[in-house]
């Protein structure tokens, strides 16, 4: 089936979404998030894009930016290629990290632009992680409330703040108030894979927590103790294969065993 051409924005403003393949995590630790942001800022500047908002979640990223339509695909490809290389090398993995093509939607009006900024900053609130966007450090929200003390050369909060007021202090106050209002626009969001809806564990972070609970329940401190109990090791492998969306390679990496050991364990009937 031919791919549908992306909609071109007359305002040159786009809301884009990167999503982990199978909704798996694309960030394991803070260093991963910092690396992605470094690439985002560097590549955006070199391709002539201004960023209005961003938010990094564990398995997806929202970005609101402005630039030439023809350069958008090149920008995303440069970010993805560099980040996937970094991630796969760091975690000794191969294969796709991101789900299919990135998603994008044009943002044409001022009202839509402001709502997109609010929606992106409130993603962790929507996910139940925090109560207020100011409590989340992995978004651009603080670059608005701390402007101009906190700035980035490729991030343009002033453009948005001046839409509320020419007085920056008043603009920031209105921005914070606006950020708490309900959305009336619909935005692109992560696509839930039908095959993982019923899975209890859908990220590496959740899997590592599950493993720690399993070890503690069985009187073990870490995975090294599993070497003396193949039955417990195999039970844990089967549990992870049944309850998680993790690949064989990911399970092997978390437990410190070979992929062959994981592959050989059959699911419970």
Image (tube, rainbow, N blue to C red):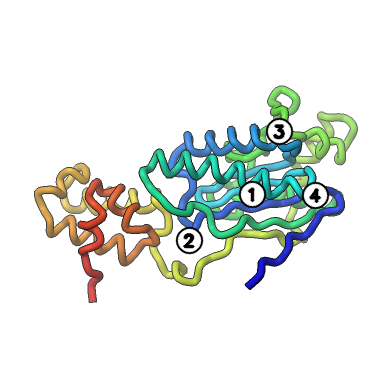
| 63 left or right, relative to 213 | right
Mark 3 or 1, nearer chain start: 3
Mark 4 or 3, nearer chain start: 3
Residue at the (62%, 51%) spot, across then down: 123
What is the CA distance from the residue labelled 4 to the residue labelled 1?
14 Å
Mark 4 or 3: in front is: 3
What is the CA distance from the residue labelled 1 to the residue labelled 2?
17 Å
- Tag 3: Cα neighbours inside 10 Å, few (<14), some, or many (≥20)? some
Determine the secondary structure under disc 3: helix
Which mark is on residue 22? 2
| 45 left or right, relative to 88 | right
Read off the residue under disc 3: 45
The quarter holding residue 245 reads bottom left
The front one of 121 and 135 is 121
Mark 1 or 2: in front is: 2
**Is 64 located above or below residue 269 in the figure?**
above
Determine the secondary structure under disc 1: strand
Question: What percent of the width, then of the height, locates residue 15?
Answer: 72, 51
What is the CA distance from the residue labelled 3 to the residue labelled 2?
30 Å
Which mark is on residue 62? 1
- Tag 1: Cα neighbours inside 10 Å, few (<14), some, or many (≥20)? many
Determine the secondary structure under disc 2: helix
Residue at the (64%, 46%) spot, across then down: 76
**Which residue is at the far left?**
228
| 192 left or right, relative to 152 | left
* Residue 41 makes an appearance in the image: yes
* Residue 179 makes an appearance in the image: no
Question: What percent of the width, then of the height, locates residue 196?
Answer: 44, 67
Read off the residue under disc 4: 113
Mark 4 or 1, nearer chain start: 1
């Amino acid at each position: 089936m031919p791919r549908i051409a992306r909609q071109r924005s007359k305002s040159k403003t786009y809301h884009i979404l990167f999503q982990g393949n199978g909704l798996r995590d694309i960030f394991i630790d803070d260093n991963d998030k910092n690396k992605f942001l470094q690439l985002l800022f560097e590549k955006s500047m070199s391709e002539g894009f201004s960023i209005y908002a961003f938010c990094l979640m564990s398995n997806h990223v929202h970005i609101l930016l402005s630039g030439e339509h023809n350069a958008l695909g090149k920008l995303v490809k440069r970010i993805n290629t560099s980040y996937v290389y970094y991630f796969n090398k760091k975690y000794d993995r191969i294969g796709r990290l991101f789900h299919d093509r990135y998603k994008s939607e044009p943002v044409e009006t001022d009202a839509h632009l402001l709502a997109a900024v609010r929606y992106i900053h409130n993603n962790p609130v929507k996910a139940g992680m925090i109560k207020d966007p100011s409590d989340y450090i992995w978004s651009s929200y603080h670059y608005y409330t701390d402007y101009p003390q906190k700035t980035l050369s490729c991030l343009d909060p002033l453009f948005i703040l001046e839409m509320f007021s020419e007085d920056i202090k008043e603009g920031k106050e209105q921005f914070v108030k606006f950020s708490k209002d309900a959305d009336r626009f619909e935005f692109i969001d992560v696509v839930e894979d039908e095959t993982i809806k019923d899975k209890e564990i859908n990220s590496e972070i959740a899997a590592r927590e599950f493993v720690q609970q399993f070890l503690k329940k069985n009187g073990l401190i870490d995975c090294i103790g599993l070497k003396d109990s193949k039955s417990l090791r195999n039970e844990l492998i089967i549990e992870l294969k049944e309850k998680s969306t993790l690949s064989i390679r990911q399970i092997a990496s978390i437990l410190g065993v070979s992929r062959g050991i994981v592959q050989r364990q059959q699911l419970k009937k």
